[in-house]
């Protein structure tokens, strides 16, 4: 698991496993948002299994799957609401972290500015 910090509240990661959830809790993560659709790849843990384990150790878990390269307005709005209401800090993940970084940028560009979100994403290794 590779974690990149966007700001005080949001971290981006590649695919996590059930075992990673303990480490995330140890890092102080309070909420997890999964942007990876189930069954996208081999050996990928199912969202329901990650959600159950997160709940068992008192971490909030949200499933908001995004098909790579497809960011409908309703998904951007739902993601924006999750960022505003989920307990911080939040870890957002997908297969590589790229679509989660894109979704973050799309959800925050009106608030923070297009140039800021683009440069912040680039700073942690994502070219959006």
Image (cartoon, grey):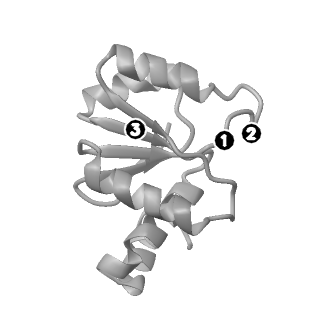
Relative image position of residue 125 (x, y in whole percent): 50, 64
Up-down relation of residue 52 to residue 6 (above or below) = above
Distance (Cα) linking label 3 and label 2? 19 Å
Q: Which quarter of the figure is the C terminus placed in?
A: bottom right
Which residue is more in the foreground, 103 or 18?
A: 103
Distance (Cα) linking label 2 and label 1? 6 Å
Q: Which residue is rendered at x = 35% and y = 26% of the image?
A: 23
Q: Is 45 on the left or on the right of 60, as rendered?
A: right
Q: Residues within 10 Å of mark 2 (few under 14, many from 20)?
A: few
Residue farthest toward the top in the current orientation of the protein: 56
Q: Residues within 10 Å of mark 3 (few under 14, many from 20)?
A: many
Give the structural element (helix, strand or loop) at label 1. loop
Query: Which numbered disc flags the more N-terminal residue, 3 or 1?
Result: 3
Give the structural element (helix, strand or loop) at label 2. loop
Q: Which residue is rendered at x = 58% and y = 58% of the image?
A: 99
Residue 65 visible in the picture: yes
Up-down relation of residue 30 to residue 111 (above or below) = above
Q: Name the residue under label 1.
A: 37
Which residue is more in the foreground, 52 or 99?
A: 52
Up-down relation of residue 34 to residue 102 (above or below) = above
Relative image position of residue 26 (x, y in whole percent): 26, 26
Relative image position of residue 111 (x, y in whole percent): 30, 77
**Do the residues under discs 3 and 1 have CB atoms within 8 angstroms?**
no
Q: Mark 2 points at which residue?
A: 40
Quarter assignment of residue 36: top right
Q: Which residue is rendered at x = 47% and y = 25% of the image?
A: 51
Q: Is 58 on the left or on the right of 80, as rendered?
A: left
Query: Which numbered disc flags the more N-terminal residue, 3 or 2?
Result: 3
Q: Mark 3 points at which residue?
A: 32
Q: Which residue is rendered at x = 45% and y = 56% of the image?
A: 78
Relative image position of residue 112 (x, y in whole percent): 31, 78
Up-down relation of residue 13 to residue 18 (above or below) = below
């Amino acid at each position: 698991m590779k974690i990149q910090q966007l700001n005080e509240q949001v971290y981006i990661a590649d695919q996590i496993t059930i075992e990673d959830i303990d480490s995330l809790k140890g890092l102080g993560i309070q909420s997890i948002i999964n942007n990876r659709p189930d069954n996208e790849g081999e050996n990928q843990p199912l969202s329901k299994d990650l959600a159950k384990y997160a709940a068992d150790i008192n971490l909030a878990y949200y499933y908001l799957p995004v098909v790579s390269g497809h960011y409908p307005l309703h998904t951007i709005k739902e993601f924006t609401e999750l960022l505003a209401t989920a307990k911080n800090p939040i870890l957002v993940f997908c297969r590589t972290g790229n679509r989660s970084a894109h979704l973050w940028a799309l959800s925050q560009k009106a608030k923070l500015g297009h140039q800021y979100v683009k440069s912040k994403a680039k700073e942690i290794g994502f070219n959006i």
